Image (cartoon, rainbow, N blue to C red):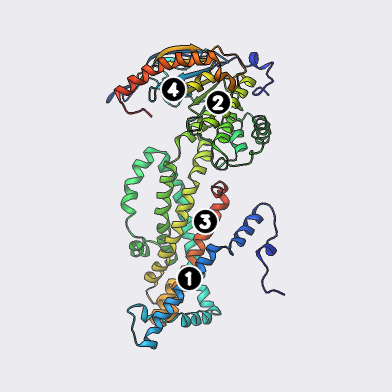
Amino acid sequence: MRAFAEPRDAPDALRRGALAIRRVSKVYDPNGGRIVAVDDCSLDIAPGEISMIVGPSGCGKTTLLNAVAGFHSISAGEIRLDGELLCGPGKLKAASGADRVVVFQNGALFPWKTLIENVAYGPVVQRRMRRQEALDKARHLMERAGLGLVVDKYPGEVSSGMARRAEIVRALINEPRLLLLDEPYRAMDALTKSVMHEALLKLYDETRVTIFFITHDLEEAIFLGSRIYVMTTRPCRVKKIVDVALPRPRDYRALSSESFRALLAETKQAVQEEAQKAFEVGERELA
Amino acid sequence: MRAFATAAEMFPRRSGTGGAVRRIVAASTEIRVRRGVAALSLFLLFWYVAVSLKGWLGIDVPWVGRLPSPGSVFAAWLGLIGDPGYWQSAYLSFMRVMIGFLAAMLVGIPVGLAAAINRYFYDVFYPSFEILRPIPPLAWVPLSLIFWPTQEMSIASVTFLGAFYTIVINVISGARSIDVRLIRAAQSMGATRWHLFWKVVLPATLPSIVTGAAVGMGITWEVVVAAEMISTGGHAGGGGLGFFIWNSYVGGSLQQIVVGMISIGIAGYVSSALIRLLGHALMPWLRLR
């Protein structure tokens, strides 16, 4: 059992997920409208860290995530994971795979499967486990994530917070090298969000899985992140990198600390400039 | 001793499907069912009054006033209940509906899914489909009588068309409206195309398949009866409820015509309801919303 390994051996055992994005560009509709979503963007994500990608709406953050996940092609540059080429010249679209599992905005649990069946889905389709074995493991992980009482419920029956937590467990059961989160808590109220944050940090402290997390909530970014990448407005590039030196494990008390406030001010300034630019250009958001 | 057992006595609490059956039966005492019964009674009352006004006050209600009274229709029905010919007609129509409907499901679901998934197939298939679709199934009756060796096959093929278009349209729109995030989530967890089809596309399309089937079933009943009327045209032919109605018309029995019509209504209602029940059983996640 690697995912959810005991905290003491986890950090070294799972130090993987180094993502290198090198001079990546993405142009939508190259012959017509030529919308440059990402332009010559480079960034490195260290294994075992939570990297928060922050930027104005529609700046191309999701485009970047889609390229890493293998949903979309890139136009130039290359992306490597632990040194292996995902996409680059000659192979502009990465193959999607269970080493980079995505958790979506608004959630994407299969409504026709119960939560436990959802969680067991990955290992079964990859033929890594038999169905029963996968269900046993799913139950075990869900119990540890505080989902023991809702294993047999359908997604439509539980709160959005429960659903999202189950979705993260559904990703982690695959022992991904990289967990890609695309504004997973966007539609949640502030209180639910803070509960979700602590639950995610607990899972992270247990697994030390590398996380690529897109958001435009700065408090979320600082509270969760090891490092924050502030992106420019379209075309998307790295504007500023902020290291978050808050000690782990963190809980909600970190939010009121002096260093948290300082980080917030620093990040806010960078983001504000870009948000202002994005607003002035006034372009429609890219999906 | 009471004449009727309560729902709870007839269906003691059990897990699984037993529980579902029990809930459905228990629901029959619910307010909504009572409302439905009240509305039906009101309908019968209006019918009765409209027919009787001439006798009571000399008022001839147009159209409705010419109908036989509900009582005489009921009497005619009672007379037919022991008549094997009536049951034979119902059986024949039912079998034709089933054959046409099942064939339409068997062909329509894969065709619809293929058209939704494969752009090339869609481009080739859809134009002809859209031109053929507005042609009423009944317009196919003369051709199908010429084309098929037996009358039975002609009726079945026309019935098939009645359900086919509806099922295909529903499957296409259902499969096309699948949330792309579900597909991507499956892909990102390592699903193969095979898995994607069977474990994501198919269950996600199931609600539309059931809707298409329920609507298609209704159309099948419409078509089968008309096809029976046209193809048998009054001379001793293939039988069925359509023929039964036509025969009653030729024989001048207004009551039997109405009995035939109501029989079709009930049969259509029951078959569509069965499909919805089956849909509920296949899609437990939709019950819980």
* Residue placed under numbered mark 2 in the picture: A98
Residue type at the position of mark 2 = Ala
* Residue placed under numbered mark 1 in the picture: B40
Pointer 2 chain: A
Marks 3 and 2 in Cβ contact (< 8 Å): no
The answer to whether any part of residue A258 appears in the image is: yes
**Mark 2 burial class by Cα count in 10 Å: few <14, some 14-19, many 20+:** many
* Residue placed under numbered mark 4 in the picture: A67
Residue type at the position of mark 1 = Leu
Q: Nearer the viewer, mark 1 or mark 4?
A: 1
Task: Look at the numbered disc 4 and give the secondary structure of its residue.
Answer: helix
Determine the residue positioned at 72% across, 75% down: B1
Q: CA distance from mark 4 to mark 3?
A: 42 Å
Q: Nearer the viewer, residue B167 or A181?
A: A181
| Badge 1 or badge 3: first in the primary sequence | 1
Q: Nearer the viewer, mark 1 or mark 2?
A: 1
Residue B125 against residue B82 in the figure, above or below: above
Determine the residue positioned at 49% across, 19% down: A52
Q: Residue furthest right?
A: B1
Q: Position of residue A285 (x, y in %)?
A: 35, 28
Q: CA distance from mark 1 to mark 3?
A: 21 Å
Q: CA distance from mark 2 to mark 4?
A: 15 Å
Q: Position of residue A158 (x, y in %)?
A: 57, 40
Pointer 3 chain: B
Pointer 4 chain: A
Tell me which corner region of the image, top left, top right, bottom left or bottom right, holds residue A237: top left
Residue type at the position of mark 4 = Ala
Residue A89 against residue B92 in the figure, above or below: above
The answer to whether any part of residue A88 appears in the image is: no
